[in-house]
Amino acid sequence: MKNYLLDRHTLLWFLNGDDTLSKPAKDILRDIENTIFVSIASLWEIGIKMSIGKLKLAYSLEEIVENMQLQNIQVLAIQPLHIIKMTTLPFHHRDPFDRIIIAQAITEKMKLISRDGEFKKYECDLIW
């Protein structure tokens, strides 16, 4: 059993059944032996972007959370150790949501599933 952390776009594409997901990502997400997490920061980012009109989805944030539960996707809370790790990261990536997700993946020793090329510049185990 392995633990994986999804980036925001990975979560949304998975829940939508979007073909944009890579084959390795699809295989991991379909394997019931894997434990899949989404950072609370990603849900926060989705909520913010939806509320300001920057992200338009055909369903509500509540429906996203319900669908996550149906798919056995767990929410990863932000812990003080994640924030401490984030403060030590180089500024390859300036987005605060992405920085905390990277810090969480490193701290929790999770593989991070993301298409974001900037993540490769960090010491996290990236899959796409």
Image: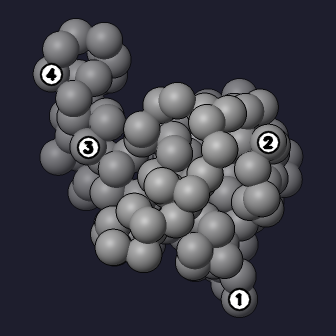
- For disc 3, the marked residue is 44
Mark 2 or mark 4, which is nearer the start of the sequence?
4
Residue 90 numbered tag: none
Question: Depth check: 114 or 108 in front?
Answer: 108
Q: Residues within 10 Å of mark 1 (few under 14, many from 20)?
A: few
Q: Residue at x 42, y 41 (%)?
A: 97
Q: Which residue is mark 1?
A: 1
Query: Disc 3 marks which amino acid?
Result: Trp
Quarter residue 14 falls in: top right
Question: Sequence order check: which comes first, mark 2 or mark 3?
Answer: 3
Residue at horizontal 31%, vertical 34%?
A: 46
Secondary element under disc 2, as helix, strand or loop, is helix
Q: Position of residue 57 (x, y in %)?
A: 32, 22
Contact flag, marks 1 and 3 (Cβ < 8 Å): no
Return the residue at label 2.
121
Q: Nearer the viewer, mark 2 or mark 3?
A: 2
Give the residue type at disc 4: Ser
Report, in whole angstroms, how far the alpha carbon at label 3 lies from the one at label 4: 11 Å
Task: First in sequence, mark 2 or 1: give its number.
Answer: 1
Task: Judge whether residue 70 can be spotted in this image.
Answer: no
Label 2 close to label 1 by CB (< 8 Å): no
Q: Amino acid at mark 2?
A: Lys
